[in-house]
Image (cartoon, rainbow, N blue to C red):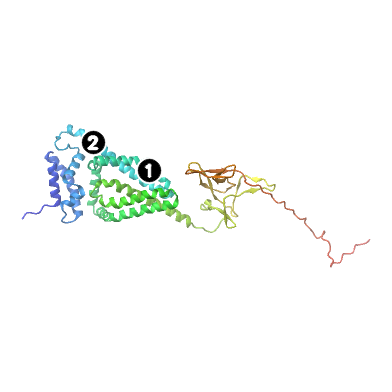
Amino acid sequence: MSEKPTAVRVYLARVRTALADLPASEIEEILEDVRPHLAELEAELGEGARVEALIERLGSPESYAAELRASGGYPAPGEGTTQVLATPAAPSLVKPRIALWGLVFSSLAFALLAFGAAVSRDPDVFLGVLLFGPVFLVSLALLLRGGVEPVLALPEAGWLRATMAKARGQEDAGKLLRYLGSLKPAWWVLCAVVLIAFGLLFMLQRRSGVLLLPFLILAAVGALWAGPRVRSDRRLLWVAVPISAFVIGGALGGFGAAIDLFARGHSYSGPSSYYPSSSDNYGNDQLTYGGRGIENVYAFDAEGKPLTEIYLYDEEGRPITVTRYGCERSSGSKQKIGEDNRFPRPKIEQGVTDDQGNYNGYNGYRGACRELAGVPFSAAIPKVTVPPTTTAATTPPSSSTPASPTPTK
């Protein structure tokens, strides 16, 4: 009784048939290169794997053979086997390369964008998508127009597949890859949760975050829909890869921001000393007096003349550093510009009043902000009258003490 052929043998037989127009020696060389990869894939699928399982992972044997032709520079069936006929096919790799590398670069940009937004907790950072968004759209358009097969047939895509196959052949790396593969369903759920959480946090952080929330919800739905289907439809990589990159970049940025906030909120305050520590140089966010916060301090001399530049220190010589604010021209709003212990500061006024006292603080979505220098009030310094110093010689005698007799000559 003959042995039943394995799934790999059946698959390779169909690949051999699709390459039948090539020289036999070259066919054998091609099959020798891909046979270890197919064997590893069959082992990963388990004992008794069917040909259908290989087709689900790699595509049909005919399309796989077409990828092998393109990656090896062989002509398509019916075009002959000479190098002269194969050379004109080289320009056809330009569009697939743009589609592939457009996906790579835009995914990296998504990751950096999410990282920056998470660190700064500012949803306006996402406006950076206007810079690289066209690259991703061009990549997606080329993919939809030319199909995913030319992209998968690129030499760099073949190198990636060979590298992954080699990694699966190693014991430790293979176990790690199989373990990560088993976590894919949970990963797409995690992506959806992180995306929605980002949207809610940015919405609470700034009003403009409301505009971002629908896009992040749409991306979360895309992750849940496209993620599990990537194996059967490689075109969905143009959805799954950017979303995964965005989530990874945002998670790393959020983790770093959380550590920074925790460190600032739980910084060690040791015994006081005359010399200020590095953490003391940052000071507090505000000064308080009578239970209320104050942003400015004005000083006058004994004649009531305002002092224009003074520096405040406490009893241990540490600078009393307070957050300094200024007007940002781009947004027309009050923004933090630094920290120091120099006073007085310009008064920050948001909104402008006209001659009639009417408030006109905003022009569309742009605010109005101005910095007012000088002292906004005058101070009457009280004159302190110092009483004359009294001594025993000038103190009149009390009624209860008899006066000393005046000596006579």
Q: Earlier in the sequence, mark 2 or mark 1?
A: 2
Report the residue at 43% width, 46% height from top: 124
Q: Secondary structure at mark 2?
A: helix
Which part of the image, by quadrant, shows the N terminus?
Answer: bottom left
> Marks 2 and 1, how far apart in space?
29 Å
Res. 178 in view? yes
Q: Furthest residue to the top?
A: 84
Mark 1, residues whose alpha carbon is within 10 Å: few (<14), some, or many (≥20)?
Answer: some
Report the residue at 41% width, 45% height from top: 125
Give residue 203's mark: none
Res. 248 in view? no
Q: Furthest residue to the bottom?
A: 400
- Residue 368 in picture, x, y percent from top left: 52, 43
Amino acid type, residue under disc 2 in the picture: Ser
Q: Furthest residue to the left?
A: 1
Which part of the image, by quadrant, shows the C terminus?
Answer: bottom right
Viewer-proximal residue, 294 or 358?
358
Amino acid type, residue under disc 1 in the picture: Val
Q: Which residue, given by chain and number where applicable, does mark 2 sit on?
A: 92
Viewer-proximal residue, 105 or 389?
105
Q: Which residue, given by chain and number where applicable, does mark 1 sit on?
A: 129
Pointers 2 and 1 in contact (C-beta within 8 Å)? no
- Residue 153 in picture, x, y percent from top left: 22, 42
Looking at the image, residue 238 lies above or below residue 287? above
Q: Nearer the viewer, mark 2 or mark 1?
A: 1
Mark 2, residues whose alpha carbon is within 10 Å: few (<14), some, or many (≥20)?
Answer: few
Q: Secondary structure at mark 1?
A: helix
- Residue 278 in picture, x, y percent from top left: 51, 52
- Residue 123 in picture, x, y percent from top left: 42, 48
Looking at the image, residue 88 lies above or below residue 34? above
Viewer-proximal residue, 267 or 328?
328
